[in-house]
Amino acid sequence: MLKKSISFLILIFLSSQMFCATMNPKVRQVPKNIQEQVFITPKETLPQLVNFLVGTSGDTSSRVKILHDWICDNISYDCNAFTNEGVGKQDYESVLKKKKAVCVGYCNLMAAMCYYAKIEVDIISGWSKGFNYPGYLYKESDHAWNVVKIGGKWKQIDVTWDAGYVDKRSFIKRYTLQWFNLSPSQFIYSHLPEEEKWQLLPEKLIRTPEQFVKEPYIPGIFFEYGLSFGKNAPEYTNEISEATGFDIVCSKPNVMMMASIYGNDAPSDMDAASWFENAGRTRRFIFDVPDKKTYSTQFGARFSGTTTNPKFFNKSDFEQNILAKLPSLVSSKKITPKEAELFEKSYYLIEENNRYYYAEDLFDNPRNLANNKILKLLDRNTHNYETVLNFDIKAASDYDGFGKNVLRFPQAYQNYQNASTISLISPLKGSLKRGSEEHFSIKTNAYSSFVIVTAEEKYEFIPKNAKTGAFELDFKIPEDAEKLELYSSKDGKQFATIISYQLEQQN
């Protein structure tokens, strides 16, 4: 049984949880008398609910999933459960009566439902890298999740984290299957059981607490995008002595990625402290730090061509720039009054957080379609990236960083970011000196030619070098140049900006 000192841990991705996950529609087809009564007389009614959901047929994995889905759809995380006396009653009857739980309550309910479904189940206690993870393990375990036996093998699932996330002190419902589909070798990056046997790993892959702390936290969404680490994998906190790259391999097609580096009091030009190279399936993300402070990286991913709407808006932005524009959309007949009504009812305000959140309902297609249509009409970003990875990075003891008020890397444009294979060899810095001589070198299979354009002339790169595989140009930057931009072309006729540098005077 989990100890009363369980810490307040739950998955939090404020811009994440958008990956398409399908909830079993049967969770909304429960007879009304059973659905209502299970929250009043849970001991008597839960067997009836389970019997309706899973019956006595079907493969075990599907039966486990529908139980998982019903809990996600009906039980909220209890953000106010933690007191000096503990977390309150977390037996399955209390959870159903409150419709709220912390992790052990979710586990107890899942275990009770599996019991009535005749599915072998257990509750695992351990440590997790969830909300407010301090970078080390507490003396006592801080989280709980389930294992279920499917096809003679144990499988780990975390219903708590699949139900949603906590933003400040508010639970935000957001259904996922991130913590349902993971293999033991993937689950171990976020969950460390107290007992080694529940890692469910071969002996040579068993993690010690020290290894668990050292490794990065990897959410389930990382694996859903078909991502894995290449040769140079990050740790939870990485010390660097120079610009350092980390390799991510993608096994799925049409996955777009981005990365950034930030800090609580970071300078405004931190966007220039990260860079990336694309080598087909492998993307190398390069980071540097300006000083001795610790910085955080954030990686995002999305499928090209897919719609991923924001899950919240800041209060003033939503009221002034979205809600206020609905009447004009109706009067111009771009939307119907019903669509406007559906949209308004789709969001709810949490004053404490100063945010409007999208009230998720995977089964309300008219409302979801109205939301997509209106956000697109208002030219809101409907191609958001999901957060798939975070880790910290800081300067090693022998490195002071690249310096303040310095642009470490140049600015990359869409043509660079979208190239299937591309790597800027030189100059890999954000600022260049006027009057200096620079050797420009860029490797790619995505473009056929490159040029630098100044106010007076166009300078063409030498065609791809057979030895180096790079387009190259030795170029002296004019003393009077205001900016320097590289242009790329696929056909040698239509050119677009791919990279730009800031120019400075010679000392």
Image: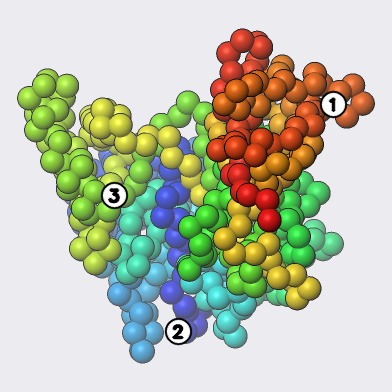
Question: For this view, does 493 lie left or right of residue 232?
Answer: left
User: How many residues crowd mark 3 within 10 Å: few (<14), some (14–19), many (20+)?
Assistant: some
Tell me which amino acid carries mark 1.
Gly
In percent of the image, x 60 and y 72: which residue is there?
293
Q: Nearer the viewer, residue 334 or 412?
A: 412
Q: Which residue is mark 3?
A: 313
Which labelled disc corresponds to residue 4?
2
Do the residues bearing badges 1 and 2 touch, measured as CB atoms within 8 Å?
no
Question: For this view, does 372 lie left or right of residue 215?
Answer: left
Residue 85 seen from this side: yes
User: How many residues crowd mark 1 within 10 Å: few (<14), some (14–19), many (20+)?
Assistant: some
Which labelled disc corresponds to residue 370?
none
In the displayed orientation, state which residue is furthest to the right.
467
Q: Position of residue 114 (x, y in %)?
A: 47, 56
Q: Earlier in the sequence, mark 3 or mark 1?
A: 3
Q: Which residue is mark 1?
A: 469
Tell me which amino acid carries mark 3.
Phe
Relative to residue 7, is residue 75 depicted above or below? Answer: above
